[in-house]
Image (tube, rainbow, N blue to C red):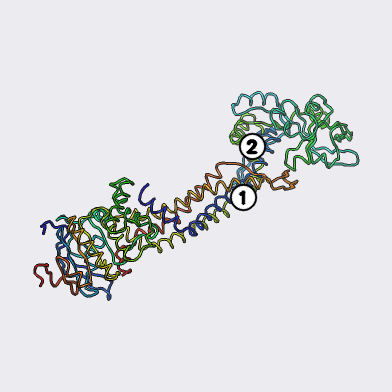
Amino acid sequence: MTPPLYIALRFLTHRKRALLLSLSGVVFGVAIFICTQAQTQGFSRYFIESNIGSNGALVVRSRFRPRYEPLMVAAKNSKGTAARRLYFEGITNPNEIMRVSRQFPDVVSCSPVLRGTVSARSGFENATVELYGIDPALHAQTTDILHQLIDGNFDDFRNNTSSIIIGSRLAELLQAGVGDTVQLLAPNGEYWRFNVAAIARAGIGSIDSTRIYSHAKIAQALLQQPSGASMIIYKLRDRNRAPVLASRFESLFQHNALSWQEREESTLQLFLTLSMSVAITVSLIILLAGFGIFNVLTMSVLAKIKEIAILRSMGYRRRDISAIFLWQGALIAAAGSVIGCLLGALMTWGVSHIPIHLRGLLYTNYFLVTWDWHHYLFATFLALVAVFIASYVPARRAAQLPPVVTIRGSR
Amino acid sequence: MSAEIGLSCEHIERYLGEEEERVHALRGVSLEIETGSVHAVVGPSGCGKSSLLYILGLLDTPDAGRVLIESETVSHLTDDELAQQRSRFIGFIFQFHFLMEDFTAQENVMIPMRKLGQLTDAQMRERAAELLHGVGLGDKLRRPSRHLSGGEQQRVAIARALANDPKVILADEPTGNLDTANSERAFDLLQNLVHERGKALLLATHNPAIAEACDWIHEMKDGRIIESQHQTTRT
């Protein structure tokens, strides 16, 4: 153990109240940072997981072709590209697009979906719903629908073309359960009768309250759509590659391709803003803890002014004196970070057990948290930086104290 | 007396304070301290005794003149090098003993040794215990320094000044804060150490009895040494 570390340890442990004050600032700063990040990101990740699990990481939809208007002059500063496209509803050749896209190593699987808006009726209840005509086998490979079922059986749906899967909130709205009949209104005014094979809960309000899955062929006939698919959804190995792949697919297939980041941009921005706002608030708490340490160490320098002069007279260099106070800060930061991380984990666990009846944007019965070691690393890093800055000034001041002035002053 | 010069200074000038408050504290002071001898600097308060001690102890730098340790000039050394010289060659004793409150008597004596870094922890403990035995505090090794009496604290300070076996001991009124019995005891201890172990001791004192017992008395006035007397020339 170096002499400055030895002295720093003694200085720290002999001022228990000051140590406790400094330590508690770091501990609570780190713990609150971890806990709040776990919460905000918990909701955000749950939304992303559920969304990708239902809608895929990437979607290819309407075909487009360039708008051939050579004389058209784009407005100044206009991005122009989108305005110069003509879109056509649906996928022209879904099987060919899926065949080619499966060659991409990033693609795990893909599934065609025929989508349309229809009216649903069950008993005396009516609702406007999004009908998703799917290939059960491909859809099960591409989405999390198998894990989303809360009642009924997917095989019953797969084996019966006149069956449907309905969203959990829609089921509540229509007061329909597994085995009940739901009628869907075709554009020609006919009601088609379907048997509810299963109920799915994606966890996202907008999906659970509107979505009905049926077999693609049946949906095509009901919706009277000439196209076999209005979109293809993709499951990717690395969801973060979705924007790159979307751009590639657009140029390759001449179909509009949308990554999940683009598709959910507004919601993700909301979560990001919330997360940043909380991070800033908690960082301020850590900075306040740093300010507390600054005060404690500054007081310590003033209290130890005689000791500093004595150490200098015994041959301790300026940097040794500086190191004594930097070590004190480092020890507080290290101990505070470790205890703070443990407390943060405990608080996160506690928060995850708080009951919350959320049925809006997301569906949850408990606070959603995420366990991410990055939060612990970042909180520790933030604490170390704050404490280093807080210790540096007093340490520097201690090193600069001319010993002879102190000794003269003590006479 | 040995002819070896442990510490010396030549033509030291030192100003203290700024502008109107500027004081010419030392005016061309030259001094040689041989090993195995005890030197006393006497004079009224403000005559420059302490300023001279701090410059000789490399705690302060002169505005002019130079300081030599074993005939080697140290005036050009950096702050870190001066600290190294203090660690190896100089032991300080102050009037107010200046012990580290959070440490025991033994740990206080070990602090200079830790800095020098030449001994193991066990060796440092053993040496600190020996030194404290030497000053009559063998039974109070583990007592926190703040729980020691004034006389005991000063004896710990003496043991600490000897921790790194320095050639030179500088003492700024080492008995100024002690009663007569403790003063005599502390001085006798220092004097014996100097003569037995061949150290050089320079002490600033107001105590005439202590000054009389020293080998040399240097009388200072207004920043100058106005008279230096060896014991043999005094009546």
Residue located 26% across and 54% down the image: B87
Foreground tag (1 vs 2) = 1
x and y percentages locating residue A267 in the rendered image: 67, 45
Badge 1 or badge 2: first in the primary sequence: 2
x%, y% of residue B113?
30, 51
**Around disc 2, counting alpha carbons within 10 Å, would you say few (fewer than 14), some (14 to 19), or many (20 or more)?**
many
Quarter where residue A154 is shown: top right
Q: Secondary structure at mark 1?
A: helix
Q: Which labelled disc corresponds to residue A273?
A: 1
The residue identified by callout 2 is A259
Drawn side of residue A315 relative to residue A348, left or right: left
The amino acid sitting under disc 1 is Thr
Outermost residue, right side = A124
- Marks 1 and 2 share the same chain: yes
Circle 1 residues within 10 Å: few <14, some 14–19, many ≥20? few
Using the rendered view, name the quadrant where residue B234 is placed. bottom left
Q: Position of residue A184 (x, y in %)?
A: 86, 35
State the residue lying farthest toward the front: B139
Q: Are marks 1 and 2 in contact (CB under 8 Å)?
A: no
- Chain letter for the residue marked with disc 1 in the picture: A
Left or right of B176? Residue A288 is right
Q: Is residue A146 above or below residue A388?
A: above
Q: In the structure shown, which secondary structural element does the residue marked by tag 2 occupy? A: strand
